[in-house]
């Protein structure tokens, strides 16, 4: 698996997996349509504006608990991020919640002009992480494979290929903090 949240304690407690080196810093973000809603810097600035979000996602959990639950009534839940993104790009909602890479990828895929969209990375105190590193995982008896994958990921980061791949899909590359 190549899309696993890097969590040292979880990896140490789970004898069935071995994790690779982290390759990406993932962040929760909100996108909004300029002109359809006011620009905002904090979740408190959203007011009653509807927000498209994938149900049972990190973004959903964050928004359900943020500001004492004041945004619960704003949320329009969808079965997948793709459905939420289509609602946003189709004009059904003026705000979209997801990870920064999901949002940027959806905007690129839908050919939505970037100057028409504002994106804010979410920063909150509380129980929901708004930023985490991603890594890969293999079965614990396949450590050689895990090391090889980790070495390949490091090579892709070091030689700029990872950044190039992300840019090709309209997504900004944010390396993990250790790089």
Image (cartoon, rainbow, N blue to C red):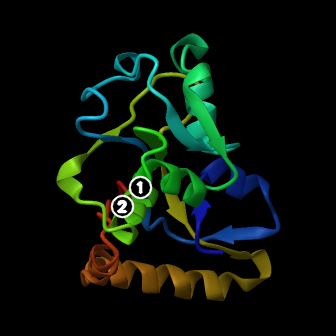
Q: Which residue is mark 2?
A: 107
Q: Are marks 1 and 2 in contact (CB under 8 Å)?
A: yes
Task: Residue 138 in the image: state x and y as whole percent.
Answer: 70, 77
Residue sitting nearer the eye, 97 or 127: 97
Q: Which residue is mark 1?
A: 103
- Tell me the tag on residue 152: none
User: Alpha carbon of mark 1 to alpha carbon of mark 2: how far?
Assistant: 6 Å
The image quadrant of residue 148 is bottom right
Q: Residue at x 17, y 52 (%)?
A: 115
Say whether residue 154 is left or right of residue 9: left
Between tags 1 and 2, which lies in front?
2
What residue occupies the far front of the structure in this picture?
Answer: 91
Q: Residue at x 55, y 25 (%)?
A: 74
Q: Is residue 85 above or below residue 143?
A: above
Residue sitting nearer the eye, 9 or 22: 22
Task: Residue 29 in the image: state x and y as whole percent.
Answer: 40, 43
Q: Is residue 89 above or below residue 58?
A: below
- Badge 1 marks a residue whose secondary structure is helix
- Whether residue 26 can be seen here: no
Q: Residue at x 38, y 67 (%)?
A: 110
Residue sitting nearer the eye, 100 or 87: 87
Q: Is residue 32 above or below residue 10?
A: above
- Whether residue 70 can be seen here: yes
The C terminus sits in image quarter: bottom left
Q: Residues within 10 Å of mark 2 (few under 14, many from 20)?
A: many
Task: Residue 161 in the image: state x and y as whole percent.
Answer: 29, 84
């Amino acid at each position: 698996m190549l899309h696993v949240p890097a969590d040292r304690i979880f990896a140490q407690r789970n004898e069935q997996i071995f994790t690779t080196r982290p390759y990406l810093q993932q962040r929760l973000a909100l996108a909004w349509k300029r002109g359809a809603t006011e620009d905002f810097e904090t979740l408190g600035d959203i007011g009653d504006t509807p927000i498209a979000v994938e149900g049972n996602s990190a973004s959903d959990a964050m928004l359900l608990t943020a500001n004492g639950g004041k945004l619960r009534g704003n949320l329009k839940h969808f079965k997948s991020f793709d459905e939420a993104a289509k609602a946003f790009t189709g004009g059904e909602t003026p705000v979209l919640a997801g990870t920064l890479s999901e949002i940027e990828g959806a905007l690129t895929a839908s050919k939505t002009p970037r100057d028409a969209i504002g994106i804010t990375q979410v920063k909150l105190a509380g129980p929901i992480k708004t930023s985490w590193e991603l890594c890969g995982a293999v079965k614990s008896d396949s450590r050689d494979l895990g090391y090889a994958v980790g070495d390949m990921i490091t090579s892709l980061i070091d030689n700029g290929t990872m950044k190039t791949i992300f840019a090709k899909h309209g997504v900004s590359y944010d390396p993990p903090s250790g790089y």
